[in-house]
Image (cartoon, grey):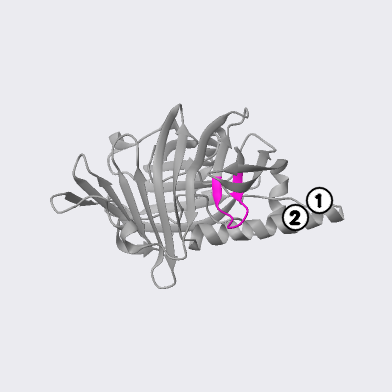
Amino acid sequence: MFLYRLPIIVLVFFSFIDVTASAAESDMEKLLGKMNQTLERGSYEGTFVFMQNGTVETMSIVHGYSETGGAREKLVSLTGDAREVIRDQDVLTYIWPREKLVVVEAASAKHSLPSTLPTDLNELAFHYKLTEVDQARVAGHECMTVHFEPLDNLRYGHELCIELINGMVLESKTFDTNGKVIENMMFTSFRMYDSVPEKLFEPGVHLNDYTWKTAGVELDGELLPDQAWKIEALPPGFSLKSVTRRLMSASNNPVQHMVLTDGLASVSVFISKVDDPSLMYKGAHRKGVINAYARDLNQHQITVVGEVPHGTVKMIGASVIYIPLH
């Protein structure tokens, strides 16, 4: 499992027509607001298990936020090979004690736990249906369990349990198009802080004799996107959220990054020129909930990656076109 990426799940809610349901919706929106605040600006630590493809990993997490320093986070694997990941705003530091290796790279906008909730909850009612609401108890905390079922085969289903007082997600599940659980994250212990002690963000090992490497860091900052790249046919409900273009240390050519979302699921499209055709990658790949599809077009590598079914990433990848601007 890629240590820093955990299920990126967000809650949706649709309107009911009676007065009682309207009150329930208001309560749900308040809980979602708490979840937003805690995930981005909360101070907490805990231990959770991550289950995927028949494997189980146990990790600890520490998260903190300050107005001056922004978000900070530390993840440590407690089973298997020793690994640590420390995020300090937009910089990620990976530590592998066995190899005595440290890799530093730019952080993506995603969090290790569920990302920010969409603002237009009603819009998602066209693509997801709330099928169950119940209360549960996880890691000694009361939480509300909500299950969301996709209305087509282009999305995965999700279920999560949100702690009632602070809005923290204590358990999350992802379901494939057949309703089978393909990924599960659950906290076994959890506590909130007013302020996380500084020492909890420090590496667990001394790094004096480690080898340091830099990977995927921007060389010259952000470039203007190439507007000639288009996605001809988006899956229903998906829209283009952002387009960026950067020079990266791992490539001699700029990489264009297009982010698509339906408000719940997120898909990334990477486009870069490949000087050596033998290095071009084609085909499909899957790891857990992540599906990827790659093809070439005009000596450019097009790669689509997202927590959506294979058919969705293939549909997006096949519809990427280049229309020269005149």
The amino acid type, in three-letter code, at marker 2 is Glu
Q: Residue furthest toward the front?
A: 140
Q: Amino acid at mark 1?
A: Phe
| Quarter of the N terminus within the rendering | top left
In the displayed structure image, the side of residue 319 where residue 56 appears, left or right:
left
Element at badge 1? loop
Circle 2 residue: 25
Q: Position of residue 9 (x, y in %)?
A: 56, 46
- Measured along the vertical axis of the image, is residue 141 above or below residue 152? below
Q: Position of residue 7 (x, y in %)?
A: 50, 43
Q: Which residue is mark 1?
A: 16
Q: Residue furthest bottom?
A: 68
Q: Are marks 1 and 2 in contact (CB under 8 Å)?
A: yes
Query: Could you give the CA–CA distance between mark 1 and mark 2, rounded to whole angstroms?
Result: 8 Å
Q: Image point 63% across, 29% down: which residue?
A: 179
Where residue 90 appears, x then y in whole percent?
A: 37, 61
Q: Which residues are magenta?
A: 160-170
Q: Residue at x 55, y 39 (%)?
A: 308
Q: Residue at x 64, y 34 (%)?
A: 153
Residue 232 inside the magenta-drawn segment: no
- Residue 117, picture quadrant: bottom right
